[in-house]
Image: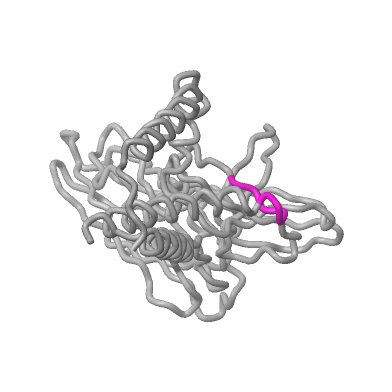
Amino acid sequence: MAKAARTLTLYVVLGFAGGVLLSIALPLAFGGRPLVVLSGSMEPTLTTGDVVVVKRVRPEDAHAGDVVTYRNPEGSLVTHRVRAVRRRGARFELVTKGDANNASERWTMHADGELSRAVYRVPLAGRLLARTSSREGKLALIVAPLLLLGVWEITRIWRPRESPA
Amino acid sequence: MSASSDTWARRAGLAIGLLLALGAVLSWRVAAEGATVGAQARFLAVPPGELTVAPAAAFVSARRLRAGGAPAHGELRLRNITGTSVSVRLRGLPSGRDLDRLLRVEIGTVYHGRLGGLRSWTRSFVVGRGERRALPARVWLPASADGAAAGAAVDVTVELRVEPRRG
């Protein structure tokens, strides 16, 4: 009975971890994109180290209150909340602001352009991803599963076989 | 534990884990604030040499002002640290013009009107030697502003011009 409980717990944890990993990777197949939050400008909605999964939308589908990701003139991606959207001919004027910022930013984009809307976040997953990008992280990513596999195989070999009931 | 119960424990565990992950992801959705985003206004006073100013941070900080909604309140506290009475005027320099005609501002009995009007120096008031003066401030959007102010955000730097009082 205790063994069944252990197996159940182990697989609940594996299922949860697998599900969370899927929630980050699966959107890539459907036009979504996971991004790592690098600053605290959107706290408390998004925290540094979170992964935010975004989905592409057209500018007319962005509304005040949405959290959107866009490329600023310096070329870096910014994820801030839309405070106002106005259409001016073939262009959209947007006012965005980080929830934790005091200043807002104004920018325009062509009506044919695309921006992304934040759908959900995975807390702290970005920190794990950042660690795996280091040399030690990559090594751990290979060594840890190999070790686990080895331990599992050894216990399987040494475990006394149960006779069929 | 039989092989079949082990298999069932694994399947059940995986299913429960996946369901928990699904529930977690649903709870991690990034919520939109809704279409009724209010206007934001912050008023911050810059201390001149002759007066101390409190609070050091914004004395009015309105995060969700709505047309016809409740005003935001604050208080600007001044203290004359010179050896003589001074005459004080103030003006506000907003970071943008979006709310100039929409936002209403009241600072004590010194100013009452549109935010844009605060760009000019107000009438003067006297702060005696060593005297403390508290100016209650109120900021609001009248019902006539409708949705025009939605999403606008402005930081207002309040400058104080101090002159020794003659006579």
The quarter of the rendered structure image containing the N terminus of chain A is bottom left
Residue B113 appears left or right of B48: right
Name the residue at 39% across, 61% down.
B13
Residue lying furthest top: A135
A33 and A139: which is toward the camera: A139
Q: Quadrant of residue A92?
A: bottom right
Q: Position of residue A162 (x, y in %)?
A: 32, 52
Residue lying furthest left: B130
Name the residue at 53% across, 71% down.
B34
Q: Is residue A105 above or below residue A117?
A: above
- The mark total stands at 0
B65 and B86: which is toward the camera: B65
User: Does residue A98 show up?
Assistant: yes
Residue A21 appears left or right of B85: right
Q: Position of residue B165 (x, y in %)?
A: 27, 42
- Indicate how the structure is coloured in the image: one colour
Name the residue at 36% across, 67% down.
B72
Q: Is residue A49 above or below residue A3?
A: above
B167 and A141: which is toward the camera: A141
B123 and A57: which is toward the camera: A57
Q: Quadrant of residue B63?
A: bottom left
Name the residue at 62% across, 53% down.
A26
The quarter of the rendered structure image containing the C terminus of chain A is bottom left
Residue B15 appears left or right of B35: left
Check residue B163 for magenta coloring. no
Q: Which residues, given as a range, are shown in magenta?
A: A28-34
User: Does residue B105 show up?
Assistant: no
Q: Position of residue B99 (x, y in %)?
A: 56, 61
Q: Quadrant of residue A84?
A: bottom right
Q: Is residue B138 above or below residue A103?
A: below
Q: Position of residue B154 (x, y in %)?
A: 51, 54
